[in-house]
Structures are given as structure tokens and as C-alpha cells.
Image (cartoon, helix red, strand yellow):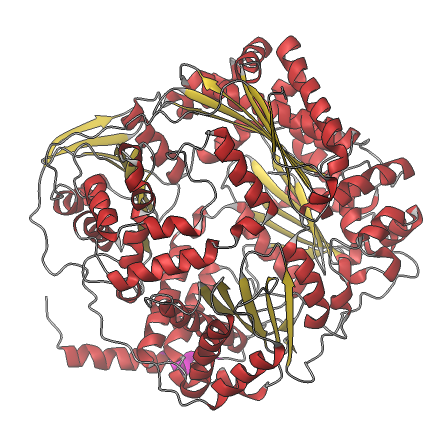
């Protein structure tokens, strides 16, 4: 091989960049992805079709309506959203709830699969259809067509849906909502956007005449404002035929209303708004620069500008993140972004969250960094790192281009139809990025500061807890003064130190693979290394460029005494905040520029280990980073102080949030104030009890010795190519031979039947939590039955408590079985609701629980749940992450992997008697703890009652 000199290589690179610059025609129109068939029917309906077989036997359908809250008349506020709800309440071909029932029958879950959303400018209906059975797709298209023009709007259904909409509205109420509603009108002052929050106005929802919502549907649900998107395992010709069959007959109204675009106006002056609330938990501030009209990107030059904007925001965010590394950081977090709620409007905004810290100091620090960027711009080294990272992102997407999920494609075409966002396809995008990045200069990047220099009028708002004596909350003039002072302050350009790109100064002495065993059934290769570590390798073709790591063993923080509780609890977070090897977190990010990888340590109550992911080209760096997390956690007193200070500030006022206070009290009562009980709601005082030396020592005890560790790698690799990395960086890890195991710390929930009532919060909001717990021998079979029981009950809860009683918007149950530290179960019920419905809902859910214990579920419900879980399993069977977790669970707990690989056979064996028996175990046990949150206005106090649920 002929070796070229460094000078020659540099010259070739410069020539290549120069050629790239000269060959890019910035005026060229961006193409639309040629792999997508886009068309338009005579009635104006647009359609997009793409064949994609990931996942197989599944098609993603979307009905996109180019109308939302912005199109409402004054008497219709909230009705765009309610019209979306009404689509599920009955159509010409599907009676009330028949759509949901049909889709459940074919394995589509309501809420997690079947869904819809309404925003300011659009309404989108989401319908994934399994195609394993003939007729499913045809019926799915019929549903889509009915949503488009056949919703019945029966008065009785409209009246019934009002309460459900109000329950959804209730869920969002609280301090943040109250403050936001005061700020939002000023954010878009003079624009229709200021008066059209999609959730609407409660008084209108309660009282609107039925014809108002019918009018909205008639005006805006029309084919020339619609798109149908079909992506999945289907022949394009067949999809096009179905679209024409179901949508060609739709007719636009004779005197259609114009689909106007709402304007947004620039701020006339710099203004400050300070809004407080007694239930707010932290102080934050946002500096909004004026919004400006920006047509969707349509040329290569526009695309280049989009890349510049992304890098500008990323680099400024990185600088802001660096300030949090100070021993006394000026804020908890801060960041900047471009964007807007309003379609085709863009704007720059900067936010800062001070927790309970000094508001003036936080705003000053944020303003100073924005001003520094305005004055001096960014450095060449920053730009080059940003280019590397952006290129790596597109390269990874390109490498996985034929393994992309249908749902990801669908979102692109929704954005293209609604806002004209470019969708040239990843092949073209990667080509453009490779051509454009070398042409982007530091002058291009810093030129974006012109936007900030020319738009001096801003709207600044500060939110936080109500001011008390000595609170650090400035007034409006003080905030203005801070902004003005920073614009005139003497500042220095950003400086950074040189950082090594090599993670390891000395490479470890490699170990060896001692044994190698193939498991043909699972498609795995199992290695035992010279240090005793076991490694499982499963090559897959699920992605072309993805490697997932799951590593673990028994151990965990239960082993530590109360005095070490918080040092152990936050040990991995503290080490991550201090860095590894010679790298603080900021330097590590710089060293990893252009690489796509991540490693994260974890310590739970009973287990410990690492997780991570990487691309193929970055595998060696990936293994090196894991090596550092085992062998070289840093101790950095300044970064430790930064970690504790930020967390103390973040959580100091968390108890002001009614639900946080409720859950905190609930768990204290549930575990009888046991000092070793798990932490559910953090408290700022916890961080004063952490000892840095003890935390680092605990980390090293738990993760610095890999004796008994199991590593699992799944993804797009060849076994023989992985082994050299494994021998060098895993077989060389320290392993003393000292065995670890979990400890049963004897923490148990209360026994018996008890009820807790808590009055907290000014909103008329309640929350019912039911916790059924007990000890039961663990088995995977019982765990599966618990999952099915929970899903059956969730269907019944939606049918009875939402649709009939109209007492909830969402809610349900979930089940958890644990084998360690002792075999136990928890079956949790959660029902957010209004205080006036608490008793009714408790009685209704008691009835459902009693019924399933007494008679078991109806066969139809069991069949729906089976089908839904089978469809979900078909997807996860081709996901590297799920395989990794399954194989680690099998290695750690000797779990039977057939519950993953042969899931369909396992679940199809279940009978209604099996689920009835499970209900007796989980719902009929002696330990039932019920907690109810009521608003303060409802009266009452913290009460614990020995009373059944």
C-alpha cells in the first residue's frame, strides 16, 4: 500500500470540498421521495402511498385534515377537538363504539395503537391495520372513509361526549396551565392563535348547541383539505385502488369556506410578564424573539439554511449546558430553539429553569450566553464538531434506510402535506448533507446572529411560585434591566480547551474467549471469557447499523444500610455527572463528536449493570467507553457540588404540586414510613445526605468488579468481528471472583385493607389510586395471566367508566410481578377524575373487579386482548432491544425464552378460567390499599381509614 503524506491528504480534502462547493446548485428544487406515490383525486383529496415491510403484515393508515382549532368560529372553541372525539362515537357504517370494538377484535388497541390528535392547524386520525386476515384492510379503509364524511353526530352522542372532553380538559389543569393561559394570549398578541387553544373553553364545551359542531364538520371535513396516507406491507396499486374506491366519491360543499392562514405579528416593544402560582414548583423564564413568516423549505439552499439553523441551536445549547457544570450553577437547565405553534412561522426563543434558585442570576446567565453568540459567534472547532455529529445522524439513518418503520415514514408525509416540509427521502438527504456540510462556513453559521441583532423587541415571561418574603423573584423592570445590562456588558469570546479524541491513554491487555457455544434455537453464540464474564451474541438483520448492549447481574443497592441510602441511590447519576477517565462530561461529548454511541450504568434495588448502543463503525469506541465506566469513574468535587445544587434547587418546591404531594404521602403510608422504602418523589434534603466518597465507593463496589456479569449484544454484527473487541475490552475487565447477589431488605407494604384520603390542590381534580399487593410464587405463566387480566379490565374500564358513566377521560390498571428480592405482586388502579365522581367510580370499578372474580371475563374480551398482545409481539420480535432484555433475563433469572419466542402459543392456551383464577389472586387478596386525592375546596384532611376499597 502506498502511504500518502499528510500534506497530500489535506490537499485532496481541500480539492474535494472545493468541488463539492462548486457542484451544489442552491436554487435547485428539492425533489419528493421517488419511492412514494403521491396523487390527487378529482375532488382535491391528496394521497401518499409507500410500500414498506417493517413491520410485516401491517399497514399504517392516516386521515389528515388540514383544519384544526384555528378554523373554529368564536362559538366553536374546542369543537375541532371534540369533532375528532365524535369520529369514534358513531358513523354511517359503524354504530357507537363499534369502530373501537372491531379494531380491538383485529388486535388494534384503543389509545396505544388507534388514536387521533387535534392541533391548531390540523386533525390527524391514526389507524394501524394488521393485514394477516382478508378483509381487515378493506374494513380499515371503510373506517377512514366514514371519519372523512360519515360521522353521524347524533345529539345523544354529542351530549354524552361533553363530559369526557371536560375530563380531558381537567387532566391538564393545574399551576402550569393557569400560568400558561395568562401568558399565551400575549405570546401571540393580535393573532387568532392567541384565542384558539385546541382544548377549547370549558363553558363552550358545556353549553354549545349541537349544530355548532355539525357546522364545523360540514365546513372543514372536505376532500380538498384532506390527505390519505398509506404506508406498509401492501402493493401500491392495491392501496391506490382502495383510496379511489372509498374517497373518489367525496364531494366538496357548494359554498366552501376559505381555508385562511392566521397571521402572527411582531412585538411592538420589549415586554415582561411575571406570573406566579402557589402550586408552582420552580422558577423559569423564556425570552421570545419575534415570530416571522417563513415559507416551507423548497430548494437546496433552503435545506442548507435548515442545517445551519440546527447547528446554531445545538451549539448554543451545548454552551448553556456547560454552565450547569459549575460548582454553583446559575440554573438547573437552559436551552434555545427555533419554531412556533403557528404554521409557517418561525422564531427564536431561549428558556432557563432556575428551580428555586436566583431568578435574576439565571436570566442574566442565559442572556449573557445569547449575547456572546450574537457578538462573537461560534468557533471553527465548534462548527466542525457540529458537522461531524450531523453527518453521523444522517449516516445512521441512511444505513438503516431499508429497515425503517412505517410509522416514521407516515409522519414525514403528514408534515409534507400540511406544511410543505421537505421529504426527499433519506438517500437524497444524505447525499445533500454530504455535499452541503463542507460548504457551510463559520460566516454562514454566525450570520444567523443577524436575526437576533435586528429583532430587538422581545416578549419575556417568568413563571414560578407565589412570592414570599426574601424570595428571589425580580419585578418587571429588574428583568428588563438585566437584559439591557447584558447587551452592554463587556464580554469575552467563548474559549475552549483542546480535548483528546482518544478515550484510553493505554490500551488494556486483552483476555481470551475460553469457551464458545452455539445455541441454534435462539440463534445465539455464548462465550465465557478468561475473567469469568459471560457474553451472549445474537446477530440480527432487524437494522443494518445498530448494536444494542444489555449487561447485568444480581446485586444492587438493597445491600446498603440506611446511612448509605442516598449515596447508593444516586451513585450512577453522580458518576455520570463527574465523568470517566480523563474526561468530564463536556469533554467527553467533544471527544465523541461524529460518533453515534451511548453507555449508561445502572444500579437498581436488586441488579446492576450497563446498557448502551452503537453503530458498527463506532464499536471500538463503544467498548472503550464501557471499559472506562467500569475501571475509571472520576471523582470531581466541583461537578459533584453542581449535581447536588441543581437537584436541590429542582426539587425544593416539588411538594407544592398536589399530585406529587399526594403520591409522596401515599408511599410513606404504604410502607409505614420505612426509611429504606423506595424513593418515588425526590426531596431536596436527600441531596444533602449524599457523601461523594461513599457514592464513588459504592459505584466501584457494584460496578468496578465484573465478576458474574452477563453481557448481551444484539444487532447487525458478525460474531467473529465482535470477538476481538470483547477479548480486548471485556475479558480485560477486573474480576476478583467475589460473588454478588441481591439482598432482601425486608421492606414490605402495609397489610390489610386501608384507605387514605388527602385534600390538596385548588383545582377540582381528584385521583383514585388502588394498590393490591401480596406475596405469591413467581412464574412467567402467572405474569402473563396478570398482563392479560389487566388488559381485559382496561377495556371494561373504558367501556363502563368512560363511555357509560362518563367519569374519566383515561385511566386503567397495570400489573407487576417480581421475583426479587421476594416473590410478590402489585396490581395498580389509576383513575383521574372529578371529585363529584369519586364515589361513583369506586363503586363501578369494585363491581368490575367482583364480576371478573366471580365469573371470569367474557370470551370476547379475552380474544381481543390475545389478538392485541399477539400483534404487539410480532413487532417486538424484530427489535434488538427486546431481544437483548429477553436474553439477559434468561441468563440472569433462568427465564424461559419461549415466553418471548413462542408468545402466540403461550397466550393462546389461556382460558377465561385462567384469567378468573388470576383475578382471585390479584384482586381478591387481603392487602388492598386505596388512596384518594380530593381538592382542598372539597374539605377533609389527611385521613387513614381501615376500610376496604
Res. 345 image quadrant: bottom right
Q: Which residue is drawn at 47% across and 77% down?
A: 364
Q: Position of 168 compared to 748: left or right?
A: right
Q: How many marks?
A: 0
| Residue nearest the viewer, comparing 550 with 98 | 550
At which x and y percent is residue 491? 39, 87
Magenta stretch in the rendered image: 20-25
Q: Residue visible at 68% across and 20% down?
A: 846
> Is 943 drawn above or below residue 899 in the view shown?
below
Residue at 76 percent of width and 62 percent of height = 196
Q: Where is residue 372 in the image (x, y as percent from the top left)?
A: 42, 83
Q: Is residue 56 magenta?
A: no
Between 224 and 503, the residue placed more toward the observer is 503
Is residue 549 among what the camera can see? no
* Residue 336 position (above or below residue 521): below
Q: In which quarter of the image is the C terminus?
A: top right
Amino acid at each position: 500500500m502506498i502511504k500518502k503524506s499528510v500534506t497530500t491528504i489535506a490537499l485532496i480534502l481541500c480539492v474535494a470540498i472545493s468541488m463539492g462547493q462548486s457542484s451544489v446548485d442552491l436554487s435547485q428544487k428539492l425533489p419528493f421521495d421517488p419511492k412514494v406515490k403521491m396523487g390527487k383525486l378529482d375532488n382535491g383529496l391528496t394521497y401518499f402511498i409507500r410500500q414498506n415491510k417493517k413491520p410485516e403484515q401491517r399497514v399504517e393508515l392516516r386521515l389528515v385534515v388540514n383544519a384544526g382549532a384555528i378554523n373554529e368560529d368564536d362559538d366553536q372553541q374546542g369543537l375541532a377537538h371534540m369533532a375528532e372525539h365524535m369520529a369514534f362515537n358513531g358513523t354511517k357504517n359503524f354504530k357507537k363504539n363499534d369502530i373501537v370494538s372491531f379494531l380491538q377484535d383485529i388486535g388494534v388497541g384503543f389509545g396505544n395503537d388507534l388514536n387521533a390528535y387535534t392541533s391548531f392547524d390540523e386533525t390527524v386520525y391514526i389507524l394501524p391495520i394488521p393485514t394477516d386476515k382478508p378483509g381487515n384492510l378493506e374494513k380499515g379503509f371503510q373506517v377512514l372513509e366514514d371519519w372523512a364524511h360519515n360521522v353521524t353526530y347524533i345529539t345523544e352522542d354529542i351530549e354524552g361526549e361533553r363530559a369526557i372532553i371536560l375530563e380531558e380538559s381537567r387532566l391538564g389543569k393545574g399551576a402550569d396551565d393557569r400560568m400558561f393561559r395568562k401568558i399565551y394570549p400575549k405570546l401571540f398578541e393580535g393573532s387568532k392563535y392567541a384565542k384558539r387553544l385546541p382544548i377549547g373553553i370549558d363553558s363552550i364545551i358545556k353549553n354549545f348547541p349541537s349544530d355548532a359542531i355539525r357546522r364545523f364538520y360540514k365546513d372543514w371535513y372536505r376532500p380538498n383539505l384532506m390527505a390519505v396516507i398509506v404506508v406498509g406491507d401492501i402493493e401500491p396499486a392495491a392501496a391506490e385502488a382502495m383510496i379511489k374506491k372509498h374517497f373518489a366519491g367525496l364531494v366538496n360543499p357548494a359554498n366552501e369556506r376559505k381555508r385562511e392562514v392566521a397571521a402572527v405579528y411582531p412585538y411592538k416593544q420589549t415586554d415582561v410578564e411575571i406570573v406566579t402560582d402557589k402550586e408552582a414548583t420552580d422558577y423559569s423564564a423564556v425570552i421570545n424573539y419575534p415570530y416571522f413568516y417563513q415559507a416551507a423549505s423548497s430548494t437546496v439552499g433552503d435545506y442548507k439554511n435548515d442545517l445551519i439553523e440546527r447547528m446554531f441551536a445545538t451549539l448554543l445549547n451545548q454552551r448553556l449546558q456547560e454552565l450547569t457544570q459549575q460548582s454553583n450553577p446559575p440554573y438547573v437547565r437552559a436551552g434555545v430553539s427555533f419554531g412556533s405553534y403557528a404554521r409557517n412561522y418561525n422564531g427564536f426563543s431561549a428558556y432557563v429553569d432556575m428551580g428555586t434558585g436566583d431568578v435574576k442570576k439565571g436570566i442574566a446567565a442565559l442572556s449573557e450566553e445569547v449575547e456572546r453568540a450574537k457578538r462573537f459567534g461560534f468557533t471553527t472547532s465548534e462548527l466542525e464538531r457540529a458537522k461531524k455529529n450531523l453527518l453521523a445522524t444522517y449516516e445512521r439513518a441512511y444505513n438503516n434506510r431499508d429497515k425503517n418503520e412505517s410509522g416514521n415514514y407516515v409522519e414525514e408525509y403528514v408534515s409534507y402535506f400540511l406544511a410543505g416540509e421537505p421529504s426527499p427521502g433519506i438517500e437524497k438527504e444524505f447525499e445533500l448533507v454530504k455535499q452541503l456540510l463542507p460548504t457551510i462556513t463559520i460566516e454562514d453559521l454566525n450570520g444567523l446572529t443577524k436575526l437576533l441583532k435586528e429583532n430587538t423587541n422581545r416578549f419575556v415571561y417568568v413563571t414560578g411560585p407565589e412570592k414570599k418574603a426574601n424570595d428571589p423573584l425580580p419585578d418587571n423592570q429588574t428583568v428588563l434591566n438585566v437584559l439591557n445590562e447584558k447587551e452592554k456588558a463587556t464580554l469575552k469570546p467563548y474559549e475552549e480547551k483542546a480535548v483528546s479524541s482518544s478515550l484510553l491513554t493505554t490500551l488494556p491487555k486483552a483476555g481470551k474467549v475460553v469457551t464458545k457455544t452455539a445455541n441454534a434455537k435462539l440463534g445465539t453464540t455464548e462465550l465465557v471469557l478468561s475473567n469469568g464474564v459471560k457474553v451472549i451474541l445474537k446477530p440480527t438483520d432487524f437494522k443494518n447499523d445498530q448494536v444494542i448492549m444489555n449487561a447485568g447481574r444480581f446485586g444492587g443497592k438493597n445491600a446498603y444500610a440506611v446511612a448509605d441510602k442516598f449515596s447508593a441511590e444516586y451513585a450512577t447519576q453522580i458518576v455520570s455527572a463527574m465523568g470517566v477517565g480523563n474526561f468530564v462530561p463536556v469533554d467527553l461529548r467533544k471527544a465523541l463528536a461524529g460518533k453515534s454511541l451511548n453507555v449508561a450504568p445502572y444500579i437498581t434495588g436488586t441488579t446492576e449493570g450497563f446498557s448502551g448502543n452503537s453503530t458498527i463503525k463506532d464499536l471500538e469506541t463503544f467498548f472503550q467507553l464501557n471499559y472506562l465506566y467500569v475501571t475509571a469513574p472520576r471523582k470531581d468535587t466541583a461537578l459533584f457540588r453542581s449535581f447536588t445544587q441543581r437537584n436541590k434547587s429542582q426539587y425544593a418546591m416539588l411538594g407544592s404540586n398536589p399530585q406529587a404531594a399526594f403520591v409522596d404521602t401515599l408511599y410513606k403510608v404504604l410502607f409505614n414510613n420505612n426509611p429504606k422504602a423506595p424513593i418515588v418523589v425526590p426531596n431536596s434534603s436527600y441531596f444533602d445526605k449524599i457523601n461523594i466518597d461513599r457514592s464513588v465507593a459504592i459505584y466501584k463496589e457494584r460496578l468496578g468488579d465484573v465478576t458474574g456479569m452477563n453481557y448481551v449484544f444484539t444487532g447487525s454484527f458478525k460474531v467473529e468481528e465482535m470477538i476481538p473487541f470483547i477479548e480486548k475490552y471485556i475479558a480485560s475487565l477486573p474480576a476478583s471472583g467475589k460473588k454478588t447477589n441481591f439482598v432482601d431488605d425486608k421492606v414490605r407494604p402495609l397489610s390489610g385493607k386501608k384507605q387514605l384520603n388527602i385534600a390538596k390542590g385548588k383545582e377540582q381534580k381528584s385521583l383514585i389510586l388502588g394498590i393490591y399487593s401480596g406475596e405469591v410464587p413467581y412464574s412467567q405463566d402467572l405474569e402473563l395471566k396478570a398482563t392479560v387480566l389487566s388488559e381485559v379490565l382496561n377495556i371494561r374500564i373504558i367501556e363502563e367508566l368512560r363511555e357509560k358513566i362518563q367519569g374519566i377521560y383515561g385511566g386503567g390498571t397495570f400489573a407487576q410481578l417480581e421475583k426479587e428480592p421476594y416473590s410478590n405482586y402489585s396490581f395498580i388502579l389509576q383513575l383521574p377524575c372529578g371529585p363529584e365522581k369519586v364515589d361513583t367510580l369506586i363503586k363501578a370499578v369494585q363491581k368490575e373487579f367482583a364480576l371478573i372474580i366471580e365469573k371470569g371475563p367474557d370470551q370476547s374480551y379475552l380474544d381481543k386482548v390475545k389478538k392485541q398482545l399477539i400483534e404487539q409481539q410480532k413487532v417486538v420480535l424484530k427489535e434488538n432491544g427486546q431481544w437483548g432484555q429477553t436474553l439477559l433475563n434468561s441468563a440472569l433469572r433462568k427465564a424461559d425464552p419461549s415466553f418471548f419466542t413462542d408468545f402466540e402459543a403461550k397466550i393462546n392456551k389461556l382460558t377465561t378460567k385462567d384469567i378468573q383464577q388470576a383475578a382471585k389472586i390479584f384482586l381478591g387478596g387481603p392487602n388492598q390499599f386505596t388512596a384518594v386525592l380530593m381538592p382542598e375546596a372539597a374539605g377533609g384532611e389527611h385521613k387513614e381509614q381501615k376500610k376496604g376499597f
